[in-house]
Amino acid sequence: MESQTNLLQAEVYQIINSCNVCTVGMVDLEGNPYVLPFNFGYSNGKLYIHSGPTGKKNTIWEKNPKVCISFSSDYQMNIRHEEVACSYSMKYKSVLVHGKVVPINDLDEKARVLNIVMQKYSGRGDFTYGKPALVNVAVFEIEVDKVESRVYLH
């Protein structure tokens, strides 16, 4: 089996930016796992997400902002012998980001971060936002504590 861990920053950046969605894991107020998909922006080593201004996740993050965010891409079935079930495996690339959700409240900073997200999905990062739009969206930076990565090739 060929596997690489602790990839170079450029490889981590490529994996993260090749994903359309990240999955954010957290612990709810009852101590149970809670996982949600998010659109995101990643620029200059900083990771951003956004959501509605209220909801279960927002309440969770007020009490416990710790998260683990998963990115995975380049899935490809690897079959060594079609008649042997144990010879089937999946090639993939993955990154885990451990950190803390930090709300961004400054409206100008929200607009800047939303343009990072929009650049990813639309190819444009020059949108303008009215005050009501900025007030009615929650924008977060993930304060990164640790990054884990792996490429599984066989």
Image (cartoon, helix red, strand yellow):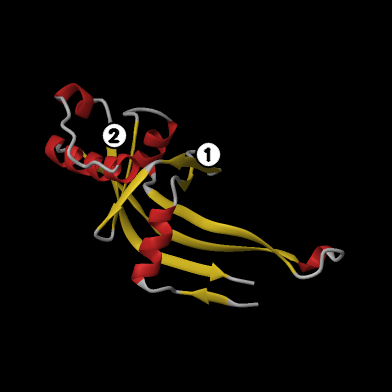
Q: Is 97 situated above or below 23?
A: below
- Residue 30: percent from the left, percent from the top? 52, 39
Q: Amino acid at mark 2?
A: Ala
Q: Quadrant of residue 97?
A: bottom left
Query: Residue at left 36%, top 62%?
Result: 13
Mark 2 is surrounded, within 10 Å at the Cα level, by few (under 14), some (14 to 19) or many (20 or more) other residues, namely some
Foreground residue, 24 or 59?
Answer: 24
Location of the N terminus (image quadrant): bottom right
Q: Is residue 104 left or right of residue 32?
A: left
Q: Mark 2 highlights which residue?
A: 138
Q: Amino acid at mark 1?
A: Glu
Q: Quadrant of residue 75?
A: bottom right
- Residue furthest toward the right? 83
Q: Mark 1 highlights which residue?
A: 30
Foreground residue, 136 or 111?
Answer: 111
Query: Spatial distance from mark 1 to mark 2, Cα to Cα?
Result: 23 Å
Query: Residue at left 44%, top 51%?
Result: 19
- Residue 98: percent from the left, percent from the top? 41, 58
Q: Is 78 situated above or below 130?
A: below
Location of the C terminus (image quadrant): bottom right
Q: Which mark is residue 64?
A: none
